Amino acid sequence: MATHKKSILTKFYLVSAFVAFILLAVVFRVFTIQQMEGDRYRELSTELTIKQDTIFANKGNVYAADGNLLATSMSKFTIRMDVLAVDGNVFEENVGALSLELSKMLGKSSNYYQNKLRKAKKRRNRYLLIARNIGYTDYLKMKQFPIFNKGVYRGGFIADHKTVRAHPIGKIAERTIGYDDFRGGAGIEGAFADYMEGENGLRWKQKIAKNQWKPINDVNEKEPIDGHDIITTIDVNIQDITHHALLRRLEYFEADHGCAVVMETATGEIKAISNLGRTSEGAYYEKRNYAVWESHEPGSTFKLASLMAALDDKVIDTSTIVDTEKGRIYIHNRKVEDSHKGGYGKISAARVFEISSNVGIVKIMKKNYDHRPQKFIEKLEKYGFKEPIGFSIKGEGKPIIPEPEDKSWNKISLEWMSWGYGVSLTPMQILMFYNAVANNGVMVKPMFIKELRRQDKTEKVFETEIVNSKIASKETLIKVRKVMENVVVKGTAQNIYSPNFSMAGKTGTAKKYIPRTKDKNGEWQGGYYSSKRYVASFAGFFPADNPKYSCIVVVHDPKKEKGYYGATVAAPIFKEIAQKIYTTTPIDNQSVGDEVDFTSIEKQYEKYNIKLNKEYKRIPNVYGMTGMDALSLLENIGLKVKLSGIGRVKSQSLKKGVRFTKGSTIILKLS
């Protein structure tokens, strides 16, 4: 009996010792964690349950020259609700009122939201989705809704903020405005990305459940600072005119793509640039910046360089007679022919240009430069054709001007260059040359940017940059400007002549070269598809006698059955742009004195404002008006206008006939 009792006591002591050992080990481990490793574990716990969330700053805005927004960052909010954070009594007392407010803002019925909130309460949902992508104004309103007005911890209101890039005037000039995102950097935004970046903010968030996070505080720990702004040279009115003129003709001719650029003659400021490419469904959008990027054979618009070089070297005059024969000649077994069957016979050099005789211009160049081609190449260098313009925006195409020492140079290179083949230039490079002719020989660099601003203060102003102070003699410039005017009056572009306003320019029709390849049968395909693919263009300026703007239009692959000549396809676009700018933009070429009667103008303007204030005490109906017309009317009566889309007004946020106060905002949706 005593032995059995002793055995039990021994086992008891062993178990007690083991338990005591385990207890001591636990105490030691707790002590170690709290005192020796406590900081590390507390830091790890914080890392797992609390995180620092970056609030990305808005990029700076991009503005048109007149102050219209071209690109801006818009705040968008996703609203969620931590239903468990709301006291039960508070929830029951206010869930109906909250549901009613959500219904008014978001559109669904009050019952829908009340059922949704009650189900979430029952399921203990801590991250219930309320709305996505709401604007800043709606976010501020929603913060004041019943329950939500109690904040994060007592009202369960969770707001996740993000910024998106928006173009208030739609996709007009989108490729030139550009972007800087996952696609890379393009256009103005890509070129000035570092300047436009702001300073990011900071907000702490806490993990709640299912890997979901909510803000710890109602306010940010560090507010983001927006980036700096860019003022472009773009004129919204001229841009709208140019975009729609190009779009209409591309659609009619079912062309692959095209571009149109308007440049202020004296300053080089690009007032409009439109680049439209065709989708497989036949719609057009800003596909690439063709005006800056696409280097191609210009065709007959290059004849201006040939004629001007010969005139400036005094090897010909505009009255020099050239025998175009029957409109067809052969040079080293290569055919040169005019579009007019039978040719033009003996005509002046001026007439060669006006009717765009290929035979005539080739004969002029062969006679005067075949023995000294480098002389002509030097002229082309003077005209700015040897090097890229050097834009700050990426992607400018490289010009190709062959030289006699090149391996590719052959017996017909010079003659082919004279009528725009064997060379390659971008529309912007051609426009810079034509603009120099309009600008009395002063070649200025095309510019897209006027100012850089930091917090509404001008930091840098971009001045006009002169590339060449004199590309030709005054006598030569007078002569070529006259023959360019005659192109419209009695030449290849007489179809766009108007007695109401003057234009000058040159048509271009180029066969499109496709790289040669062998097909599956071993037959060579490619080359100049004379019966299939063309590039139609027109470059010039207006008014002819005192140029204010220069302009180029280039259209690739118009449907041949509908037309492919520069005079048929591109010149009418030029005319529409010029005509509408004439009627909507003041051009100071009709002044008859040195003084302007500002008193008279101010009185008329005052009368106009009084009339507007009397007539428009209520919101007018702008449905069906063009975006620019509606914008002008509404801003003049004191409203702030926001536009989305392009074209004509299809809806307005403030209904017609409603009284308004000055400074109110109206949103117009355009078709």
Image (spheres, grey):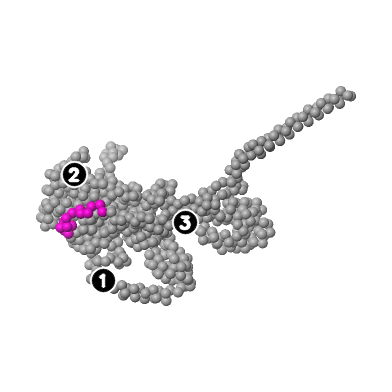
For residue 475: magenta?
Answer: yes
Q: Residue at x 56, y 63 (%)?
A: 104
Q: Mark 2 highlights which residue?
A: 413
- Image mark count: 3
Q: Could you tell me residue 417's position as x and y percent?
A: 20, 47
Please tell me whether mark 3 or mark 2 is closer to you in this view: 3
User: Where, quadrant-wise, is the N terminus in this rendering?
Assistant: top right
Q: Residues within 10 Å of mark 1 (few under 14, many from 20)?
A: few
Please tell me whether mark 1 or mark 3 is closer to you in this view: 1
Left of 335 or right of it: where is 555?
right
Instruction: Pick the residue in front: 232 or 112.
Output: 232
Q: Residue type at mark 3?
A: Met
Q: Could you tell me residue 197's position as x and y percent?
A: 43, 51
Residue 16 is drawn in which quadrant? top right
Q: Mark 3 highlights which residue?
A: 74
Distance from Cα at disc 3 to Cα at disc 2: 54 Å
Q: Mark 1 highlights which residue?
A: 595
Q: Residue type at mark 1?
A: Glu
> In the displayed structure, would residue 644 be above or below residue 6?
below
Q: Sequence-wise, which precedes: disc 3 or disc 2?
A: 3
User: Where, quadrant-wise, is the C terminus in this rendering?
Assistant: bottom left
User: Is disc 2 placed on a helix, strand or loop?
Assistant: helix
> In the displayed structure, would residue 289 be above or below residue 149?
above
Q: Residue at x 55, y 47 (%)?
A: 52
Report the magenta residues as a range.
Answer: 466-480
Q: Could you tell me residue 69's position as x and y percent?
A: 41, 59
Residue 482 visible in image = yes
